[in-house]
Amino acid sequence: KEDDFTARLEAALALKKEREGKEERSGKNHLKKSGKNSDKRDKKKENEEAALAKSKEDAMEAEETEAKEKEEEKPPKIDPKQCLFDKHTSPTIASNLSRMQRKYNFFLPDAEYLIDLEGLIGYCAEKIQLGHVCLYCQKVFRTADSCQKHMIAKRHTKIRYED
């Protein structure tokens, strides 16, 4: 049970790291060079490209430094006793669920068939905290905080349930 949780957490962190690591593309590689350009234009263009390459190198160094700082940050702790929509931590999972029901109208559909409450709450927390995904509309956000704010504002504090 705990191994499954750890495996899901590692997979979610790897997916997040992959998503953040994508490089920007200039979008100009597909253009053909025109044979009509004069030498002056070519030299000017080369100088501009060299300056642009230098600025890109500086930007990449800054991004690498920022990425290293982000790596040093610890991933959010997934705790089934913590509310999915704010920072409140309850003493038990049942009291957390009760509080979320009272404050945010959160409910679990077909709860009588639920076997692993802790696992389900943990999974929902992973989706919000690591994936930044709304539980209802599946929209992806830049941060977990913006995801939580969206869910509260749009009243998406529920799990999508389809027959």
Image (cartoon, rainbow, N blue to C red):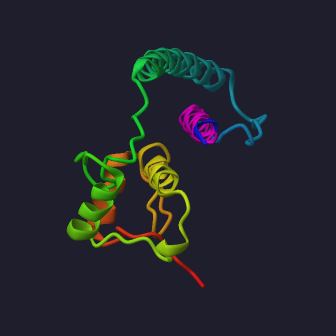
Q: Quadrant of residue 101?
A: bottom left
Q: Is residue 97 above or below residue 53?
A: below
- Indicate the quadrant where residue 19 lies: top right
Residue at (40% x, 35% y) in the render = 77
Percent coordinates x, y for residue 49 in the rendering:
58, 22
Relative side of 158 to 48, left or right: left
The one nearer the camera, 144 or 98, is 98
Task: Write down the region rendered in magenta.
Answer: 4-23
23 horizontally vs 140: left or right: right
Q: Residue at x 28, y 64 (%)?
A: 98
Is 143 above or below relative to 71?
Answer: below
Could you say which is closer to the camera, residue 111 or residue 105? 111
Residue 140 placement, left or right of 91: right
Q: Nearer the viewer, residue 73 or 59?
A: 73
115 w.r.t. 48: above or below: below
Determine the main secondary structure of the stretch shown in magenta. Answer: helix
Relative height, residue 112 to residue 99 (above, below): below
Residue 13 shown in magenta: yes
Looking at the image, which residue is at 27% across and 57% down?
95
